[in-house]
Amino acid sequence: MRDYVARFFGGGKPSEERVSQEKEKVERIPLDHIHPNRYQPRRAFEPEPLDELARSMANFGLLQPVIVRPLTPAPSDEYELVAGERRLRAAKMLGWTDIPAIVRKMGDIEAASLALIENLQRESLNPLEEAEAYSELMRLYDLTQEALAQRLGKGQSTIANKLRLLQLPDFVKQGLAERKITERHARALLPLKDDARLAAFYVDMLKGGWTVKETEKRVQRLLEPKAKKLRFGKAIPRDLRLAVNTIRQSVHMVEESGLIVDMEENDEEDYYVFTIRLPKRPQQKRS
C-alpha cells in the first residue's frame, strides 16, 4: 500500500517526511496499546457488518493484519492505528487481548493517505465522509479537483458534487449521515442559502417524505419571484371583487387545514387568471 500511495500521489506536493524502508514483519500488539486513527474518515460503523466481521474472525482468524505506526517519542510501545479500524473493533468485540499488526514508521501525510484511500477503495463511506476524505486528500497533496479525479479514476463532476455537500449546514449534514435523507436530496437543498429558510423547508421535506424530484421542484418554486397579487381599481364591479376575495379565502382555508397550496394570480387582457396547484399526494405543512 505504501508504494501505491507514492505512485498515486506522486504528482502532488512532495512530502518532506521520509518513511523507513525497513522490511516489514507482523507482530502481535496488545489492543490497549493501539490508539485510534486521528485521520479516520469514517464516523459511523454499522453494527451488522461489524458483527459479521467478528463472526468471520472468530471462525477463521484475522486474515489481514492491521497497520499501525509507532507513537513518538521513541522508544515507545504505544501505536496509532493507520488501517484496519473495523478489524480492531471486531477484535475488541471478541475479547481479544492482542492483534496481528504490521508496524510502519511513517509521517502524518502518509498515515492520513493510507486511512483515507483504504476507506475510499472499500466504498464503505457515507457521502459526507467521502466528501471529507476528498477534501483532506486535496489539502494534504495540494491537488485540484481535476487532479484528484484523475488519480481516483473518477469524473471531476463526481468529486465536485461530493465536495458541495460540505457547504450544507450542520443539521442537513447530520440528516445525511443518519440516512434521513439521500445524497440527491441534500444536493437539491444547496440553492437555499438562508439557513432559517432552509431549516423550515428541511422540516417540511422530512415530514412530507418528498421525493428528490418533488424537492427540486419545491426549491425552484421557492426561489422564483412571487407573483404579485392583483390590484383592482375603483372601476372593478363589486361582484368581481367578491369573487376574487372568495377564491383567496378558500385557498387560505385549505392552507389552514395543513396542506401546501401554490396559487398564482395574473391579469390578462380579457380575464383574471388564478392558477392553483395541489400535489397529487398532499403533503402536510410544518406545524
Image: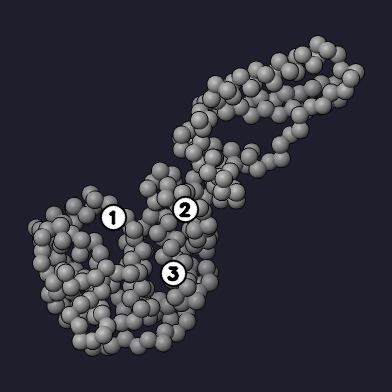
**Which residue is the site of mark 2?**
170
153 up-or-down from 8: above or below: above
Q: Amino acid at mark 2?
A: Asp
| Residue 161 in view of the camera | no
Badge 1, how many Cα within 10 Å: few under 14, some, many 20+? few
Comparing labels 3 and 2, the label whose residue is closer to the camera: 2
Residue under the point 54% across and 37% down:
214
In the rendered structure, find residue 136 and report the number of the disc placed on it: 3
Q: What is the distance, in whole Å, between disc 3 and disc 1 at their CAs?
A: 20 Å
**Lower position in the chain sequence, tag 3 or tag 2:** 3
Q: Which mark is residue 206?
A: none
User: Tag 2, which secondary structure?
Assistant: helix
Q: Residue at x 13, y 72 (%)?
A: 30
Looking at the image, which residue sits at the far right? 235
Q: For residue 127, what is the image quadrant?
A: bottom left
Look at mark 1 in the image and give the residue it sits on.
45
Q: Amino acid at mark 3?
A: Glu
Q: Nearest the camera: 164 or 235? A: 235
Determine whether 103 is above or below 208 in the image.
Answer: below
Which image quadrant for residue 124? bottom left
Relative image position of residue 227 (x, y in whole percent):
74, 34
Q: Amino acid at mark 1?
A: Phe
In the rendering, at what x and y percent does residue 133 appear?
41, 65
Q: Is residue 9 left or right of residue 189?
A: left
Q: Earlier in the sequence, mark 1 or mark 2?
A: 1
Front in this rendered view, residue 277 or 195: 195
Determine the residue positioned at 88% across, 23% down: 233
